[in-house]
Amino acid sequence: MDFLERLDFLMEANGLNRNTLSAKSEIPYTTIDGWYKKGYEKIRLSTLKKLANFFNVTLDYLIYGEEKTRPQLSERVKMISEQNETFRETVELLAILNQNMIESVYQIAKELNARPDH
């Protein structure tokens, strides 16, 4: 499957034609139509990025037919949530360590004040 066949597949899967793709992706219709009439060998990287973002696919998929989709938003949210949980646990451990340190300093001060030479 070449680039235009993948583009046709993506448009069909999303219920789009060249006009609606142009309007929704903000890629000029003449650019899209030109790929079909003149070829797509000189397609700009910025245009490929727009298409990839619009269809939520990777550049590799558009160009080579590999890696069909990006990680879903729920996967990204899960990853961020796990990172936040790790951060929260780290802060809790630091708070415990800080409390232990305060208690140790207090105990040392108490012992020093209890000495007869003070």
Image (tube, rainbow, N blue to C red):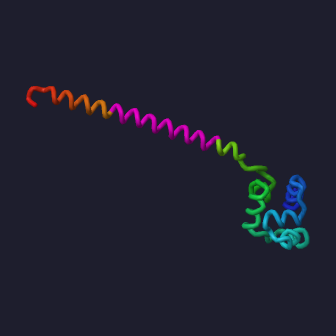
Quadrant of the image occupied by residue 55: bottom right
Looking at this view, is 72 or 115 the one in front? 115
Looking at this view, is 44 or 81 the one in front? 81
Residue positioned 79% across, 58% down in the render = 62
Task: Report the span colored magenta.
Answer: 78-100
What is the x, y in percent for residue 31? 83, 71
What is the chief secondary structure element of the magenta stretch? helix
Looking at this view, is 36 or 19 the one in front? 19
Q: Is residue 76 above or below residue 3?
A: above
Residue positioned 72% across, 67% down in the render = 46
Residue positioned 90% across, 68% down in the render = 36
Looking at this view, is 60 or 110 the one in front? 110
Is residue 95 within the magenta segment?
yes
Is residue 106 within the magenta segment?
no
What is the x, y in percent for residue 48? 76, 63
What is the x, y in percent for residue 118? 10, 31
Which residue in the rendered view is the most extreme toward the left?
Answer: 117
Left or right, 93 with reference to 62: left
Q: Is residue 18 above or below residue 98?
A: below
What is the x, y in percent for residue 88? 50, 38
Left or right, 50 with reference to 9: left
Image quadrant holding the N terminus, namely: bottom right
For the image, the number of numbered tags is 0
Residue positioned 76% across, 50% down in the render = 69
Q: Is residue 73 above or below residue 109?
A: below
Left or right, 98 with reference to 75: left
